[in-house]
Image (cartoon, rainbow, N blue to C red):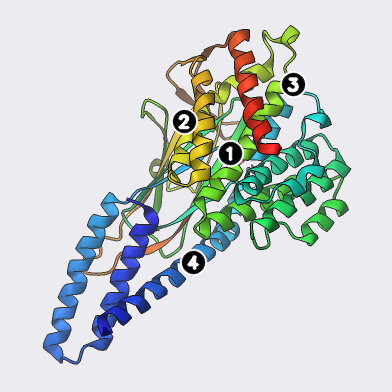
C-alpha cells in the first residue's frame, strides 16, 4: 500500500515536472534562440525538446528556391556543445557546425527546392558515475525573400 | 521510443533514487548500495537515450506558405479566403484546430498584400479559434492593438503574426496536444495549397512560377503524413490521414528529379548556396485533378 502511494506521488511529481520543464523550454526558445534569427523573419513554427547529453533529434523540412534561410539551433547552458548537421535526401552532409566552431546558426539559399534533414546531437561531458545533463534544445527557422 | 516517455522514465528513475536516498534507514552500507543503484541506473538511462529519438516533421508555416504565394507573383483575391463570418460554425476541437491554421494562413496572406482591415478581422477570427481550443495567451487583445498601431509597418506585422502562431503551436506541443498542433499545421498548409491552385489560370499554365511552387509541395506530402501518423489512433487524425492519402495519390503522379547538391560559399552575403538542378513534370490534367482534390478537402474543412 505504501509502495502504491509512493509510486502515485512519484507519477504526479513527474507529470507536474514535465509540464513545468516544457513551459520553461518555450521561454528559453523565445529568449535564447529567436534573437539568433536577427534580420530573418521567424516562420512561426516551434521545435524544441528536452534532450539529454548524447541524445539525438532529427527534423525534416522542405526549403524553397525563392527564399534565403537561417537555421538557429541553441541548447541550454547546462548542456555540453550542441552539434548539428544538414543532410540532403541521399544522406550527403551539406553542413556540419562541428567544423565551424559549433556555430549556432547557418545561412543558406537554394537553386532548387529540396527536402533536407537536420540531425541535432547533444555531445557528452563524459563524466562517469554522474547523472547525464539535460536541458532544452530549440530549433528555429527564419526566412527572407531571395534578392 | 517516444521522447516524452524517455524523459518521463528518466525523471521517474531520478525520483526513485531521491526516495531511496531520503527514505532509507540504513547507515553507510545502505548508502553505498543506493549509490550502486544510481550508477546502474545511469547506464540504463544512457541505453534508454540511445533508443530514444525525437523526430520533428516541419511543414511550411502559414506565414511561409503565404510568402511563397506572393513571391511567385500571385495576385490577392479576398474571395478565396475563408469568410470570418464562418467563425461560429466551428465548435469541435478538430474544426477549431484546422480553422486556426486556415485563418492564420489567410491573415498572413492579407498581411503580405497590405489588406489592413482584413488582417485585423482575420486575427480576431484566429483568436476566437485559439480561445476555443483553450490556448492561453496565444493571441491577446494587446497583439491586436499592436497590429492596429503598426498597420503600415510590415516588419512588425510579420513579427506579430509569427509570434502569435508560435504561441499557439508551442502551447499545444508543451501541453501534450500534438494531434491538435498537427491539425493546425495541416489546416494552414491545405489553405496555402488551395489558394495557390485557385490562382492558376490554365491559359498561363506553362512557365507559371506559382505552378512550380505547387509542384514543390510534393516534397512536403510525406512530412505531412508522418506528422499525422505520430498521432495515429486519434479518430480526427485518422480521418485527416485518409483525406491526405488521396492527395498523395495525385502528388505521386508528379515527377521531380533533382541532381546532386553541391555547396558554394558566397563571401559577399556570407551565405552558402546549395546548387542543384531540378526537372519536374506535371501535366495540366494532373494539375486539375490536384486542384479538385485540394478543393474537396478544403471545402470539408470550412463548412
Above or below, A122 against B201 in this view is below
**Residue placed under numbered mark 1 in the picture:** B186
Percent coordinates x, y for residue A128 in the rendering? 21, 66
Tell which of B15 and A128 is nearer to you: B15
Q: Mark 1 or mark 3: name the one nearer the start of the chain.
A: 1
Q: Mark 2 or mark 3: name the one nearer the start of the chain.
A: 3
Asked if the residues shown at circle 1 and circle 3 are in contact, with their CB atoms under 8 angstroms apart, the answer is: no
**Residue placed under numbered mark 2 in the picture:** B222
Task: Say which mark, if any, is on residue A19.
Answer: 4
Quarter of the rendering containing residue B42? bottom left
Cα distance in 3D space between marks 1 and 3: 20 Å
Percent coordinates x, y for residue A16 in the rendering? 46, 72
Percent coordinates x, y for residue B213 in the rendering? 63, 22
Q: Quadrant of the C terminus of chain B?
A: top right
Asked if the residues shown at circle 2 and circle 3 are in contact, with their CB atoms under 8 angstroms apart, the answer is: no
Asked if the residues shown at circle 1 and circle 4 are in contact, with their CB atoms under 8 angstroms apart, the answer is: no
Tags 3 and 4 both on a single chain: no
Tags 2 and 3 both on a single chain: yes
Cα distance in 3D space between marks 3 and 4: 43 Å
Amino acid at each position: 500500500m505504501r509502495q502504491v502511494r509512493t509510486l502515485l506521488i512519484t507519477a504526479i511529481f513527474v507529470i507536474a515536472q514535465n509540464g513545468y520543464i516544457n513551459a520553461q523550454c518555450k521561454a528559453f526558445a523565445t529568449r535564447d534562440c529567436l534573437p539568433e534569427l536577427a534580420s530573418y523573419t521567424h516562420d512561426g513554427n516551434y521545435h524544441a525538446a528536452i534532450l539529454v547529453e548524447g541524445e539525438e533529434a532529427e527534423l525534416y523540412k522542405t526549403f524553397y528556391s525563392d527564399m534565403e534561410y537561417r537555421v538557429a539551433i541553441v541548447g541550454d547552458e547546462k548542456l555540453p556543445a550542441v552539434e548539428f548537421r544538414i543532410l540532403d535526401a541521399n544522406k550527403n552532409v551539406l553542413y556540419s557546425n562541428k567544423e565551424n566552431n559549433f556555430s549556432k546558426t547557418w545561412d543558406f539559399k537554394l537553386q532548387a527546392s529540396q527536402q533536407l534533414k537536420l540531425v541535432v546531437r547533444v555531445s557528452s561531458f563524459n563524466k562517469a558515475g554522474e547523472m547525464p545533463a539535460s536541458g532544452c534544445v530549440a530549433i528555429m527557422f527564419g526566412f527572407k525573400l531571395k534578392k | 521510443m517516444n521522447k516524452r516517455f524517455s524523459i518521463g522514465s528518466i525523471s521517474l528513475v531520478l525520483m526513485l533514487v531521491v526516495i531511496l536516498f531520503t527514505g532509507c534507514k540504513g547507515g553507510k552500507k545502505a548508502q553505498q548500495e543506493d549509490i550502486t543503484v544510481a550508477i546502474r541506473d545511469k547506464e540504463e538511462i544512457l541505453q534508454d537515450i540511445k533508443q530514444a529519438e525525437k523526430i520533428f516533421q516541419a511543414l511550411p508555416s502559414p506565414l511561409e506558405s503565404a510568402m511563397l504565394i506572393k513571391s511567385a507573383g500571385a495576385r490577392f483575391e479576398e474571395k478565396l479566403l475563408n469568410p470570418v463570418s464562418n467563425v461560429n460554425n466551428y465548435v469541435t476541437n478538430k474544426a477549431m484546430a484546422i480553422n486556426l491554421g486556415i485563418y492564420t494562413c489567410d491573415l498572413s496572406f492579407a498581411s503580405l498584400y497590405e489588406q489592413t482591415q482584413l488582417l485585423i478581422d482575420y486575427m480576431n477570427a484566429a483568436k476566437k479559434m485559439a480561445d476555443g481550443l483553450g490556448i492561453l495567451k496565444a493571441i491577446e487583445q494587446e497583439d491586436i492593438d499592436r497590429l492596429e498601431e503598426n498597420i503600415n509597418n510590415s516588419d512588425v506585422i510579420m513579427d506579430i503574426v509569427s509570434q502569435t502562431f508560435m504561441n499557439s503551436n508551442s502551447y499545444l506541443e508543451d501541453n501534450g496536444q500534438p494531434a491538435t498542433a498537427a491539425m493546425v499545421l495541416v489546416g494552414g498548409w491545405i489553405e496555402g495549397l488551395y489558394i495557390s491552385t485557385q490562382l492558376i489560370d490554365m491559359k498561363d499554365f506553362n512557365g507559371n512560377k506559382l505552378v512550380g511552387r505547387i509542384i514543390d509541395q510534393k516534397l512536403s506530402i510525406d512530412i505531412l503524413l508522418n506528422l499525422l501518423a505520430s498521432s495515429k489512433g486519434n479518430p480526427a487524425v485518422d480521418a485527416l490521414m485518409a483525406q491526405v492519402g488521396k492527395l498523395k495519390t495525385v502528388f505521386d503522379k508528379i515527377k521531380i528529379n533533382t541532381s546532386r547538391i553541391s555547396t558554394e560559399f558566397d563571401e559577399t552575403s556570407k551565405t552558402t548556396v546549395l546548387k542543384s538542378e531540378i526537372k519536374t513534370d506535371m501535366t495540366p490534367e494532373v494539375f486539375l485533378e490536384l486542384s479538385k482534390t485540394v478543393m474537396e478537402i478544403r471545402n470539408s474543412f470550412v463548412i
